[in-house]
Amino acid sequence: MSYIFPPQVLSIIPIHSSQAVFPVHRIYCVGKNYAAHAREMGSDPTTEIPCFFLKPADAIVTNGVMPYPSATSNLHYEGELVIALGKGGSNISEQNALEHVFGYAMGLDMTRRDLQTQAGRNGQPWDTGKAFDHSAPISTIYPHSLVGHITSGSIKLWVNGQLKQDSDISDLIWDGPRMISELSKLFTLQAGDLIFTGTPAGVGPVLAGDQLELKIAGLGVLTVKIV
C-alpha cells in the first residue's frame, strides 16, 4: 500500500516536565458553560444547557503566535481550562470520568464572532466562526499526577496587560466529570481528545499586534501574540 500524497503529521502538544508529547485526536469545545458568559451572549443559563461543538485537531497552536484569520473583522478571545484525555470510552459515568483524564492545560477558543453571530441568526452551524485555522492556541499539558484534578481556582485573561476575564473554575455549570460523561453519550471518546471547557464572561475583540495572557491557578501562564 502507498499513499497518493504524504499523510498529515499529527498535532502534538508538549507535556510539562517530560520529553514525551501528547498526540491530539479531536478537539471538543463546550459553549455556554459559565452562566455570566451565557448571559453576555444573549442566552439564558436557567433554560439553556451547555452545548458542544468541535475544532479540527490541526487548529492547535503551541508556539505562542497566532495569525489574524481571514474573513473576519471581529476576532474574539475566550480563555478556557482544557481537559486532556488519556483514556477513551463511551457512556462513561460521572463517577468514573476522572479516570479518563491525563491532565490539564490552558487554551484559547479564538472566535470569528461576526461569522458565528451570522451563522446563529441563520440557524447554521458555528464551524466558520469557531473551526478555522490556528483557532486553538494551547499551553503545555500538565499531568494530573503533578497538579491534581482541577475543580476550582482562578482563571484570568489579560489583553495588552489589561484584565478582561476574571472568574473561577468552580463557576462552570458542567464540571469536568459531567462534561466527559455527556460527551461520551454522543461520541466514543479516545485517548488524545481535548475538551475546551468553556469561557467566563468578559470576551472581546483583539487586533493584530495584541498580546493575550491567560493564567489558571496551578497551570502557569499562556502567552499568545496575534500577528
Image: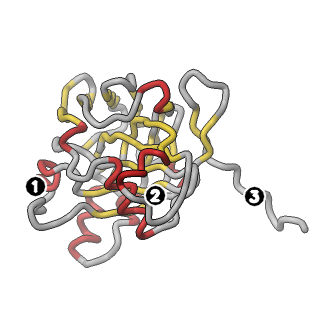
For the question of whether residue 204 can be seen, the reply is: no
Q: Quadrant of residue 32?
A: bottom left
Going by the numbered disc 2, the residue's amino acid type is Lys
Going by the numbered disc 1, the residue's amino acid type is Arg
Give the alpha-carbon distance from disc 2 to disc 1, as whole Å.
23 Å
Instruction: Tell me if mark 3 has few (under 14), some (14-19) or many (20+) residues whose alpha carbon lies within 10 angstroms of its own.
Output: few
Give the alpha-carbon distance from disc 1 to disc 3, as whole Å.
43 Å
Going by the numbered disc 3, the residue's amino acid type is Pro
To which residue does mark 3 refer? 7
Q: Position of residue 112 (x, y in %)?
A: 33, 55
Residue found at the far right of this picture = 1
Sequence-first tag of 2 and 3: 3
Give the alpha-carbon distance from disc 2 to disc 3, as whole Å.
19 Å
Taking the spot 47% from the left edge, 24% from the top edge, the residue there is 146
Taking the spot 89% from the left edge, 66% from the top edge, the residue there is 2
Q: Position of residue 113 (x, y in %)?
A: 27, 56
Asked if residue 98 is positioned above or below residue 16 in the image, the reply reads below
To which residue does mark 1 refer? 39
Instruction: Tell me if mark 1 has few (under 14), some (14-19) or many (20+) residues whose alpha carbon lies within 10 angstroms of its own.
Output: some
Sequence-first tag of 2 and 1: 1
For the question of whether residue 55 can be seen, the reply is: yes
Please tell me which residue lies in front, 151 or 213.
151
Asked if residue 38 is positioned above or below residue 204 in the image, the reply reads below
* Label ID, residue 55: 2
Q: Position of residue 21 (x, y in %)?
A: 63, 35
Q: Is residue 183 left or right of residue 151?
A: right
- Tell me whether circle 1 and circle 3 mark residues in contact (CB < 8 Å): no
- Tell me whether circle 2 and circle 3 mark residues in contact (CB < 8 Å): no
User: SS at mark 1?
Assistant: helix
Taking the spot 28% from the left edge, 57% from the top edge, the residue there is 31
User: SS at mark 3?
Assistant: loop
Taking the spot 46% from the left edge, 58% from the top edge, the residue there is 55
